[in-house]
Image: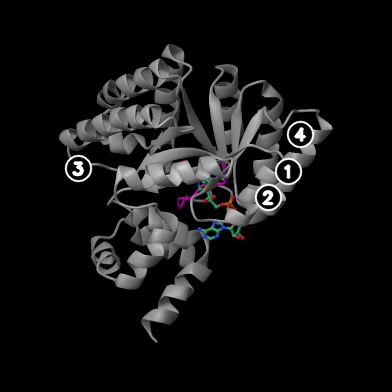
Amino acid sequence: MIRATLIALSHNRAAKRFVLSNRLARRMARRFVAGEELDDALAAARASNEAGMKASLDFLGENVATREDAQRARDMYLGIFDRIGRDRLDANVSLKLTQLGLDFGAEFCLEQMLPIVKHAESLGNFVRIDMEGSAYTERTIEIARSLRGQSAAVGTVIQAYLRRSEQDVRSLVAAGCRIRLCKGAYLEPPEIAFAEKREVDANFVRLMEILLPSGVYHGIATHDPRMIAATKEFAEKQSIGKDKFEFQMLYGIRPDLQRQLIREGYRMRVYIPYGLDWFPYFMRRLAERPANLIFILRNLFR
Ligand SMILES: Cc1cc2nc3c(=O)[nH]c(=O)nc-3n(C[C@H](O)[C@H](O)[C@H](O)COP(=O)(O)OP(=O)(O)OC[C@H]3O[C@@H](n4cnc5c(N)ncnc54)[C@H](O)[C@@H]3O)c2cc1C
């Protein structure tokens, strides 16, 4: 119930105004967002690298209002790859297709994406296409597949809560596409998504067991110790080396677990969002853990 409300509010303008004007919420958002400027994200990526972790930079933004906004986002991503290269960081980029104009048509979005992927490829880098709500799943997979046909420097994300995901995993892996496996952060109806945590977790493990032996380098993105333990155990049983996949976690969440995995010799990538458009991202993070919201409310009423 709380989760559904928070995710629904992530698109609400009044809620956005309220949260943006609230000092405590802004301070709390800083736990999940590296800062407003690219330099903030680069500094966070450098700190992650120094701790033995890789990074993925996300210039926050989704569902842009105009084509010009999408073109500006494209230019921003081209520049981010240049800075990553110049600063010699071990970092790639994560982005959302609705930030690159998917709402203006798949063709327009592909026109923005192709130069980004080609630029990443020319620098030996990589673009991860985040997965958004189910209204975009099919188009996101099609665009990822089309880009993957033109470059190996692109991959996408599969959400374990969607019933369709096993089929998508099998077809994307057959196309050699690198996948980040996560549970899924949006609000989806039971006809298309597993509603129970138990079912989502079981599907996560099922998909992980398809991904790991596929010979393609994938990311296992979770903070759930049970999913992490299942992944380690399966990899060990199948003699899949620790360098054949990576764990991924979000900036500011379970840094202790991030460090522990590094100490154990696993690869870890931290997803580092930055920018001014942090409201929907922040609301999804609150929805994942109601304790975060209770903390804010308790302080508001104090
Ligand atoms: C690198 C990365 C990229 C992602 N990309 C996408 C994407 O493209 N599309 C998409 O739909 N989703 C994405 N997600 C979000 C994902 O789908 C889940 O919503 C999120 O990771 C929470 O699920 P969990 O696997 O951590 O397990 P959960 O069962 O939700 O959480 C397990 C434990 O992790 C900790 N935890 C989890 N979330 C939080 C939080 N917000 N604050 C504090 N503690 C927390 C808690 O200790 C919790 O008990 C991504 C997640 C990661 C790590």
| Alpha carbons under labels 3 and 1: distance apart | 45 Å
* Residue tagged 2: 260
| Alpha carbons under labels 1 and 4: distance apart | 14 Å
Residue 154, by quadrant, is top left
* Residue tagged 4: 235
Residues marked 2 and 1 touching at CB (< 8 Å): yes
Residues marked 2 and 3 touching at CB (< 8 Å): no
Name the kind of residue labelled 1 in the image: Glu
Residue 16 spot, x, y in % from top left = 27, 62
Residues marked 4 and 3 touching at CB (< 8 Å): no
Residue 301 spot, x, y in % from top left = 38, 85
Q: Earlier in the sequence, mark 3 or mark 1?
A: 3
User: In front: mark 1 or mark 4?
Assistant: 1
Q: Residues within 10 Å of mark 4 (few under 14, many from 20)?
A: some
Magenta segment boundaries in residue numbering: 182-188
Name the kind of residue labelled 3 in the image: Ala
User: In front: mark 3 or mark 1?
Assistant: 1
| Alpha carbons under labels 4 and 3: distance apart | 44 Å
